[in-house]
Each structure stands twice: as structure tokens, then as C-alpha cells.
Image (spheres, rainbow, N blue to C red):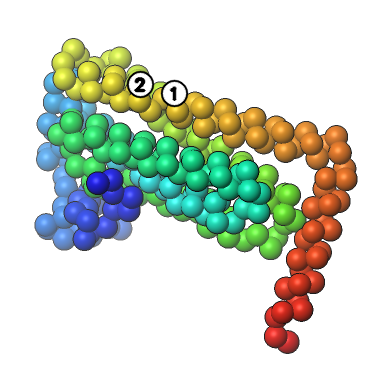
Amino acid sequence: MVTTAVRPETGATIKPGPMITVPADRLVQDDQLRDFAADSGLDGPFLADQFSAFIAHERMGLNLLRTLHTRTDNPGLRNRYAELEGETYEAVGEWERLIEALGGNPQYASPAGRATEALDDKVTEALLLSGSADPLTFEQAEVQAYLAAANQCVAQATLLAAFAEEADDGQAKQEMTASTGALLPPARRHADWATDTLRTMAVAQAKHPMVRKIGEAAEQIVDKVRNAVTPG
């Protein structure tokens, strides 16, 4: 079963940092990662740390998509976000499979993974502040947030392809090559969809000012309803 949130109770292991103290039973040091992707000829601890960050981003992508699905008022976008969540869940599963095949723990939280999680969490947190913009502006910001996340997925899969290309012939190279084939095409499709959607939204508003006026009017109506039902 895919793990969507890494916690001590799910089996997390952690490499300490300058401000991070880790219990002995959860502690991971570089010496324990030397055999990660052992026959690749690459630096095992570095790869383990990178893949920890990559899977952390995919997991945070699930949180982002759940937030987008909940907050959007556009039925078409809501359905698409639900589809993307399912496909992102599959990507998390593929990263888990790869990490295990290379001799690692998919629940290893590296310093790079923690940094990635913190950055991605800020993006999702920002989307909770919808009162700062009208609905159309906020819908566009949501697509922009997803586009940034999708482009990062493309970058990660591209890096995986580069690692596979540089790896020595062997099982690790084969596993990384196979996972690249599973991860890169959908990541590119997701980024292309977000780019096309953002273009459609922006051009429609640029060509048809009435679209924005309707959005602003809808916001005013919603505000009036909120004020009417909110106790004074």
C-alpha cells in the first residue's frame, strides 16, 4: 500500500541535521546508505537523499491536488484535479517501488526531502488565503501552483533519466531506466495540461473583459450572502 504521509508510526527513518535530533531507532547515517543502488557506480548516499526529496514532492503533490479539488468552483477543474490526484498516487507508488528495488526505504526522510516538503507546504498553505483575490484570479493562481509542481515532477524524472544514463550496467540502471519510462511521460502531460489551461484562462480574460466582470460580480454576490448569514 502506498504511503502518502511519512510519520514515525508509519516507519519513518531520518538523517539528522543541524537542528534535528533523531531517536536512535530512527537514525540514518551516510554509512548505512552506501549500498543504495550499489551496482550503479554512483554515490549511494547522495542518490538516496535525492530520491527522498523526489518522492516527498510527489506526496506533497497529493496534498496540493486535494486542496485544489476542494477549493475550486469550476466543475471541469474539480474533475481534472481528481484525475490528477489518482495519477500522482500512482507516481508515488512508482517512486516507492524504485527506492525499494535499489535497496532503500521509501520512508527515509533526508534533509533534502524535509526541505522539499517545507517548500511545497508553503504553496498549499498560500492557497488557503482565498480572500485576497477575486475567484477568477484565484482559479488562475491555483493552476499556476499546479504548473510549478508539475514542472518539478518533470525535472525530477529527467534527473532520474540522467542518473540511469550515467549508471554502470546492472540492476540499478535497469530499474532507474524502467521508472523513468513510467514517470516522465505522465509528468510531461501534466505540465502541458497546466500550461494549456493557464493559457486558455488568461487569453479568455484578455480577449473578453466581461468574463472578469462576471467573476467580480459573482464575488460580490457571494460576499453579500456571507454577510447575510454571518452573525453580527
- For label 2, the SS is helix
The residue carrying mark 2 is: 181
- Image height check: is 107 above or below 19? above
Q: Of 129 and 198, which appears nearest the observer?
A: 198
Is residue 2 something one can see in this rendering?
yes
- Image height check: is 15 above or below 177? below
Residue 81 at x, y percent in the picture: 53, 44
Residue at the image position 19 percent from the left and 36 percent from the top: 100
Left or right: residue 202 compared with residue 154: right
Furthest-top residue in this view: 169
Residue at the image position 21 percent from the left and 27 percent from the top: 43
Residue 28 at x, y percent in the picture: 16, 47
Q: Which mark is residue 185?
A: 1
Amino acid at the residue labelled 2: Gly
Residue at the image position 70 percent from the left and 32 percent from the top: 199
Question: Is the residue under label 2 in contact with that under label 1 (CB below 8 Å)?
Answer: yes
- For label 1, the SS is helix
Left or right: residue 200 compared with residue 125: right
**The C terminus is located in which quarter?**
bottom right
Residue at the image position 13 percent from the left and 26 percent from the top: 38
Q: Of 185 and 7, which appears nearest the observer?
A: 185
Furthest-bottom residue in this view: 232
Residue 227 at x, y percent in the picture: 75, 76
Q: How many marks?
A: 2
